Image: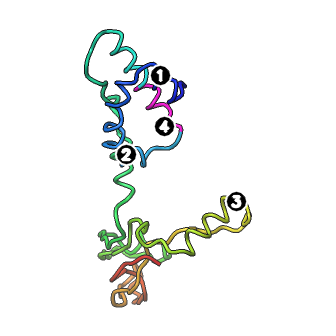
Amino acid sequence: MPSFSRDRQRYPRALERRQPLISQYSAMFESYTEGEIRELVSTLVERYREAMNSGEEELPSFPKGVNRMKRARARHKPCSLKELEVSVSELGLGYESDETLLFRYCAGTCDAALRNYDLSLKNMRSKKKIKKDKIRARPCCRPLAYDDDVSFLDVHNRYYTVKELSAKECGCV
């Protein structure tokens, strides 16, 4: 991959135009992995060279069909309450019942809730100071409160009540 300083010597005017392009797409670059950025930059450099050799004035656009940005945005939805209609049997708690209920759950990311603890823990893991423990170095989207208890009849006409089943309020813990 060519270095930035060598490109500056070969294409000084083009690099002046490239700076706004890079800053314009900086948010998108943050959602890419290092390998994907390298591939993208090499593709852009190659297209740039082709454009310069063909006499085109405009800088080349990003490769078509790149859906990484959409996937990255989808993963970064804030922690919130969701709901799903399911049967009691589908809950996986060992009850056989055809009754349905509205199951509320928490989903989303908690990046905005990162604290010094989370940042320090992540740093200690990256430096291999903490090795074997299974630790999440960021807050989790979890229920802060639960709906009322859920009562139902199973297929044998036995009555059950389950506590803390459905979320009422979500937050980053």
Residue at 42% across, 69% down: 110
Q: Gap between marks 4 and 3, in whole Å? A: 24 Å
Which label belongs to residue 26?
Answer: 2
Mark 2 or mark 1, which is nearer the start of the sequence? 1
Of the image marks 1 and 4, the number of the one nearer the N terminus: 1
Secondary element at image label 2: helix
Q: Check whether the beta carbons of the residues at disc 1 and disc 4 lie within 8 A of each other.
A: no
Residue under numbered circle 4 = 36
Dot in front, 3 or 2: 2
* x 30%, y 43%: residue: 24
The percent position of residue 16, horizontal first and vertical second, equals 34, 31
Q: State the residue position of label 3.
A: 127
Residue drawn at 47 percent across, 26 percent down: 42
**Residue ID at (32%, 73%):** 81
Dot 1 amino acid type: Gln
Q: Quarter of the image holding residue 163? A: bottom left
36 inside magenta stretch: yes
The quarter of the picture where the N terminus appears is top right
